[in-house]
């Protein structure tokens, strides 16, 4: 039944001429900052970013993960875990006239999951942040994220202030110059909003072993429901937390992604939604019969 539903959805969106794109990169590398430039270049009308459906300078539907009070609720919001919020965005998508939509996420798995939950086809083109930003630009963005706790939402400040005034920090104008020789396209200005999310804090974040374990369990549940956490060992180093995660995996189950992708997913989720720096995520696998 699920396979039939996926086939039907794919055929439906193909019939409507809808194309899904994705912009992927590690947390804090400047994806939201550059999303409008990608959208402009590829004539993409809609953007999905951290729980929000955005068109131009307006928020059409959704709820911002950046206004959530803690890690777990922020992750759920970004992934449209709440059925009512899913439904609101799906309904908004059905009312809009568009041909292209951009989904922003920290991994290919994440953007595919968002697309599935919003009844959209899988992305047919995935951009990686390294393709559109230099190493120096990415390093600068990450430094600002993890030392100052600043994030970007790609809509004007007045739009964010209307919905989430408590997280607004500053506004930012980005200039875009077109290579086309048309006077009205030579330069465009996009206003973005700098926010300091409720879950993002200055300085070092001290987290209990129990809280870290709960976060890891949630990450695993989002990544692959067949994986069960047996134990999480935490070592606090000067540079951050070093985690050792013991997993139980059914013998008959094949993990859809590599263990390295799982390690990156856990580390980036902790950094993105908990401002928790990790020096490493070590995985130990224990198989068990069903």
Image: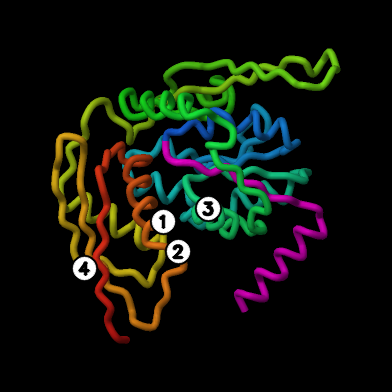
**Quarter of image, res 262:** bottom left
287 to 127, vertically: above or below:
below
Q: Residue 145, image x and y in percent?
A: 38, 28
Cβ–Cβ under 8 Å for marks 2 and 1: yes
Could you tell me which quadrant the N terminus lies in? bottom right
Pick the residue in front: 234 or 165.
234
Sequence order check, earlier mark of 1 and 3: 3
> Residue at coordinates 47% horizontally, 22% vertically from top-left?
194
> What residue did someone put label 1 on?
261
Sequence order check, earlier mark of 2 and 3: 3
> Residue at coordinates 68% horizontally, 34% vertically from top-left?
39
The question of residue 18 being in magenta is answered with yes
Sequence order check, earlier mark of 2 and 4: 4
> What residue did someone put label 4 on?
230
44 to 10, vertically: above or below:
above
- How far, Cα to Cα, is label 1 from label 4? 20 Å
Q: Secondary structure at mark 2?
A: loop
Q: Is residue 74 visible?
A: yes
Q: Secondary structure at mark 3?
A: helix
Position of 9 with respect to 15 (left or right) is left
The residue mark sitting in front, 1 or 4, is 1
Q: Which residues are magenta?
A: 1-27
> What residue did someone put label 2 on?
257
> Residue at coordinates 41% horizontally, 66% vertically from top-left?
224
Residue lying at the far bottom of the rendered structure? 290
């Amino acid at each position: 039944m699920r396979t039939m539903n996926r086939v039907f959805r794919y055929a439906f969106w193909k019939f409507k001429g809808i194309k899904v794109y994705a912009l992927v990169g590690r947390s804090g590398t400047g994806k939201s900052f550059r999303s409008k430039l990608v959208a402009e270049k590829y004539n993409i009308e809609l953007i999905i970013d951290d729980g929000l459906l955005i068109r131009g300078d307006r928020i059409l539907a959704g709820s911002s993960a950046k206004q959530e009070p803690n890690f777990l609720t922020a992750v759920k919001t970004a992934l449209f875990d709440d059925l009512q919020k899913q439904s609101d965005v799906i309904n908004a998508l059905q009312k809009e006239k568009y041909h292209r939509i951009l989904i922003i996420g920290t991994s290919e798995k994440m953007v595919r999951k968002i697309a599935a939950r919003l009844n959209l086809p899988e992305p047919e083109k995935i951009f990686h942040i390294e393709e559109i930003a230099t190493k120096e630009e990415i390093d600068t963005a990450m430094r600002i994220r993890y030392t100052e706790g600043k994030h970007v939402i790609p809509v004007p400040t007045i739009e964010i202030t209307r919905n989430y005034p408590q997280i607004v920090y500053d506004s930012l104008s980005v200039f875009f110059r077109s290579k086309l020789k048309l006077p009205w396209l030579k330069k465009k200005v996009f206003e973005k909003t700098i926010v300091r999310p409720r879950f993002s804090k200055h300085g070092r974040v001290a987290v209990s072993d129990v809280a870290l374990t709960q976060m890891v369990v949630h990450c695993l549940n989002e990544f692959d429901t067949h994986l069960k956490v047996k134990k999480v060992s935490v070592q606090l180093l000067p540079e951050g937390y070093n985690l050792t995660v013991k997993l139980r995996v059914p013998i008959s189950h094949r993990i859809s992604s590599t263990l390295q992708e799982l390690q990156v997913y856990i580390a980036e989720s902790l950094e993105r939604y908990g401002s928790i720096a990790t020096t490493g995520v070590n995985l130990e696998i224990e198989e068990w019969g069903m």
